[in-house]
Amino acid sequence: MDERRRARYERIYHQLDALITDKSPTLTAAMATLCAVLHAKMPHHFWTGFYFVSREDELHIGPYQGPVACQILRGQGVCVDAVKSRTPIVVPNVEDYPGHIACDARSKSEVVIPLLKDERPIAVLDIDSADLAQFTEIDVAPLQKLVSLLTPLA
């Protein structure tokens, strides 16, 4: 990852920490704030949002920024797989991902970060880009750090 992106993540973390920690009244409010800041500050983000875990194989839309999204994800796809595995997933080309659910055909690459509370998945942060290979494993740790700001509210 280029050094500018790394520095941008660090600035975003400090901004979100100041906005969320001991200030957000609910998990949903904190998620909305996180989405708004990330989406505005990361130019390669086409869609930035959360899906709440209803069941391990069913997710419901939460706060997001970007075009209209799928309201329910069932059974398969990157987000459901991240919930089942409880681990982040980076997809350089969504066309190559088995069972990918295309909520918007313009999405080309994706990263999904689970929000866990006591090892139980609560939600996932899902970020799409309209360009291929916009996310790598190097994005995972800074995004997990951002999502960790939500854990006390989960």
Image (spheres, helix red, strand yellow):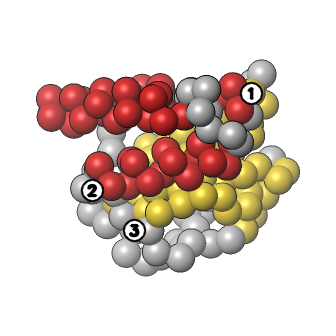
Q: Which amino acid does label 3 sit on?
A: Ser
Is there CB contact under 8 Å for labels 3 and 2? no
Q: Earlier in the sequence, mark 1 or mark 2?
A: 2
The label nearer to you, 3 versus 2, is: 2
Q: Residue at x 15, y 29 (%)?
A: 3
| Disc number lying in front (1 or 3) | 1
Circle 1: is it few (<14), some (14-19), or many (20+) Cα within 10 Å? some
Task: Look at label 1 and name its amino acid.
Answer: Lys
SS class, disc 2: loop
- Identified by mark 2, the residue type is His
Secondary structure of the residue carrying tag 1 is strand
The residue under label 1 is 117
Location of the N terminus (image quadrant): top left
- Pointer 3: residues within 10 angstroms few (<14), some, or many (20+)? many
Residue 128, position in %: x, y? 42, 58
Secondary structure of the residue carrying numbered label 3: loop
Q: How crowded is mark 2: few (under 14 residues within 10 Å), some or many (20 or more)?
A: some
- Tag on residue 12? none
| Residue 17, percent from left and from top | 47, 28
Residue under label 3, please give it. 107
16 or 39: nearer the viewer: 16
Choose the circle earlier in sequence order: 1 or 3.
Answer: 3
Give the image location of residue 94, x and y in percent.
Answer: 43, 61
Taking the spot 47% from the left edge, 63% from the top edge, the residue there is: 65
